[in-house]
Image (cartoon, grey):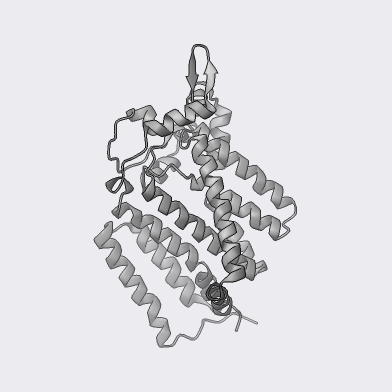
Amino acid sequence: MRDSPPRIGTKGLVVPALSLAYLLFSYLLIGFRPEQLVLLAICNACYYLSATTRRFITGFSIFVVFWILYDYMKAFPNYAYRAVDIAPLYHAEKSLFGIHAGNQTLTPNEFWLLHGSPWLDVMCGVFYLCWVPIPLAFAGYLFFKNRPLFFEFSLTFLLVNLLGFVIYYLHPAAPPWYVQQHGFQFQPLRMGSTAGLARFDAFFGVNIFKSIYAKNSNIFAAMPSLHSAYPVIVLFYAVKNRSGIFNYLFLTVMVGIWFSAVYNSHHYVLDVLAGISVALIGIIIFRLLADKSRAFKRLINYFLLATAPV
């Protein structure tokens, strides 16, 4: 049977109203940007195109909320509320994971800065490009194949991000590239650095990572590494979904992202371990809420009903 456009009553006006509110609020907080219109165009098109796409964007509204919250962090830089951890984190990294080279001790970032190679630049760039597409692609698969697990995965993803955002404001931390480029003195930066990923861009003559990090919402949000947290969530739910050979793919991507984060000087090993810990804590908290909280169970049931075929 052909999928027809959904019947839109007065409730259908909620989405345009939210879209206008989002544009106005964004303009006041962070200014207008073209990608805001792209996001709204996708959301509205999916909502009105057909019943299937409407259910799809309803489910993926969880990821839309994540993106908006992340974007709005630009309006409230964490360094405005607490001092940024620069030197202590660097020295802790060197103390715990330092590599002895000649008469000096290097952090793993500094070691790979001296011992990198073109093939590692390319490999690590490819892995780092997977940090958002892989979770979104996996979520899309679950939406059509295992709807209950989709909402478990999506809500866990949102919860882990919220935990990470809270830590960013409680403990602002500078990434390794900041020390390499600016030393230990604090400077309020508004634009991130591609660091080692610039070598990937240069190798292929592109500006992929340059364009990504020019839009970074928070420079001093190195710990925990959410880059390192996302693949942990994906692997956990892939195993739970019994995804077979894809589990090995997700495992490879996970380890690759962890190594790439350090190799490209975007995170310390401590940041990676913190990201892994936040992912595991988020998964545990979600399981407790899903098992013990009636309100949380009602939330999941609401999403299931809202996205169920009519």
Q: Residue at x 51, y 83 (%)?
A: 6
Q: Residue furthest left?
A: 28
- Most extreme residue toward the bottom, as rendered? 9
Answer yes or no: is residue 172 visible. Answer: yes
Q: Nearer the viewer, residue 27 or 3?
A: 27
Q: Is residue 266 left or right of residue 26?
A: right
> Residue 64: x percent and y percent?
45, 64
The answer to which of 233 and 23 lies nearer the viewer is 233
Q: Position of residue 106 (x, y in %)?
A: 49, 22
Q: Position of residue 263 (x, y in %)?
A: 52, 32
Q: Name which residue lies at 41% across and 54% down.
A: 166
Q: Which residue appears at 57% of the width and 80% of the height?
A: 305
Q: How many marks?
A: 0
Q: Residue furthest top?
A: 103
Observer able to see residue 129: no
Residue 178: x, y in percent?
A: 37, 33
- Asked if 302 appears above or below 272 in the picture, the reply is below
Measuring 45% from the left and 38% from the top, which residue is drawn there?
Answer: 206
Q: Is residue 236 left or right of residue 278?
A: right
- Quadrant (top left, top right, bottom left, bottom right) of the N terminus: bottom right
- Classify residue 243 as left or right of residue 277: right
Q: Nearer the viewer, residue 245 or 164?
A: 164
Q: Quadrant of the C terminus?
A: bottom right
